[in-house]
Image (cartoon, rainbow, N blue to C red):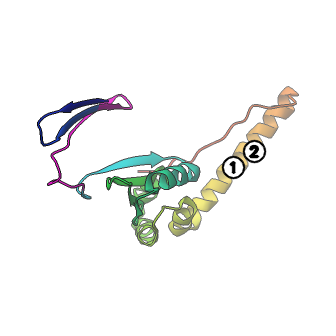
Amino acid sequence: MEKQVLSQRHCYDHSVQLDGQGVHSVNGGPHFKFTEAISLVVHCQTQQRVDHFWEKLSEGGQQVECGWLKDKFGLSWQIVPDVLLELLESGDSQQSERVMKAMLKMKKLDIEGLKRAAGRRVVLREARAAKFSQQINADHADQNGDQEAPYYRFALCHPR
């Protein structure tokens, strides 16, 4: 991280690399405060990752709502499970509405709660995918006489 004093008013120029992306900021002094007008988004594939970032980033800060939090410096973050976007963009307007209503009641987003709100179809599709994965693995072991069959897992594809 580069840090340069731009004037005697203690304004700092910062440049960092985040996942290969250059980010540049300027501290304009005490007259300019962080607001929700800018936030950083963390996309998470699992509840474990949601929980991790939620706890670490909100430590010393403030847990807000709908996956938003403020860190100890006052910077706003959104901790978003990938499944939220899949459920909201499924093409089923009733499902999207149920998921949105559930999300609006949450502080930290809960993947299972969002899936429950989406309705029975998501749960059934996931159960079928899990059963299919188990059957493929069992068939592979039977056909090849393997003690330890490779693990195959089939993910759901949500229509857009």
Q: Residues within 10 Å of mark 2 (few under 14, many from 20)?
A: some
Specify the label residue 130 is tagged with: 1
- Kind of residue indicated by mark 2: Gln
Q: Residue at coordinates 54% horizontally, 54% vertically from top-left? A: 51
| Total residue callouts | 2
Q: Is residue 34 left or right of residue 51?
A: left
Q: Quadrant of residue 13?
A: top left
Residue found at x 32% / y 53%: 75
Q: Which residues are magenta?
A: 16-34
For the residues labelled 2 and 1, say whether their Cβ atoms are less than 8 Å apart. Answer: yes
Give the residue type at disc 1: Ala
* Viewer-nearest residue: 119 or 54: 54
- Image quadrant containing the N terminus: top left
For mark 2, what is the residue?
Answer: 134
Q: Identify the residue at image location x=56%, y=48%.
A: 156
* Left or right of 5, for residue 105: right
The residue that appears at 16% across and 41% down in the rendered structure is: 11
Q: Is 17 contained in the magenta span? A: yes
Was residue 58 drawn as part of the magenta stretch in this picture?
no
> Which of the pair 131/82 is nearer the observer?
82
Residue 37 shown left or right of residue 129 in the figure: left
Which percent across, then down, holds residue 110? Answer: 53, 62
Q: Position of residue 145 (x, y in %)?
A: 88, 28
Above or below: residue 90 compared with residue 22:
below
